[in-house]
Amino acid sequence: MADVPAGDSLKGKKIFVQRCAQCHTVESGGKHKTGPNLNGLIGRITGQATGFTYTEANKKKGITWGKDTLWVYLENPKKYIPGTKMVFAGLKKKQERADLISYLLESTSK
């Protein structure tokens, strides 16, 4: 398992707004955009957000989203799930990833 450093959710929110919000929402009942609404992400299996059309690669990956899986995925999404339609190149800086994960843990569980 990955050793995920502590993150700052306020910094993570800024990263989300700059890098993720164009394609994703986090609030409960939020609509899908190019990417799925992320509410309830933690503990959900890949490719399972109701009402979103996923690639077969996402549906078949079969992992459960959590800190450790997000840590690896957000570094290089296309490497972690070959065939995903997510065009985001990833966050190479460890602290940025930790901050974003901290924000996602808070914001997607409300």
Image (spheres, grey):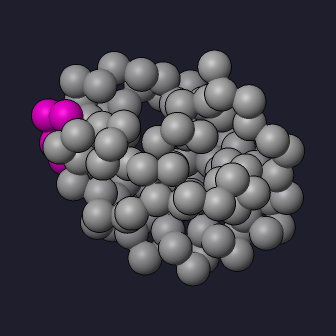
Q: Is residue 53 above or below residue 13?
A: above
Q: Is residue 65 above or below residue 1?
A: below
Answer with left or right where residue 97 lies relative to residue 60. right
- The x, y position of residue 29, in whole percent, is 50, 54
Q: Quadrant of residue 82?
A: top left
Q: Is residue 33 above or below residue 40?
A: below
Magenta span includes 56: yes
- The x, y position of residue 62, in whole percent, is 34, 20
Answer with left or right where residue 20 lies relative to residue 97. left
- Region in magenta: 53-57
Magenta span includes 21: no
Residue at 33% of width from left, 42% of height from top? Answer: 79
Residue at 19% of width from left, 34% of height from top? Answer: 57
Q: Nearer the viewer, residue 90 or 58?
A: 90
Residue at 29% of width from left, 25% of height from top? Answer: 61
- The x, y position of residue 41, in whole percent, is 53, 39
Residue 59 shows in the view: yes
- Main SS, magenta region, reads loop
Q: Nearer the viewer, residue 1 or 33?
A: 1
Residue 48 shows in the view: no
- The x, y position of residue 56, in whole percent, is 14, 34
Q: Nearer the viewer, residue 70 or 107?
A: 70
Residue at 85% of width from left, 44% of height from top? Answer: 6
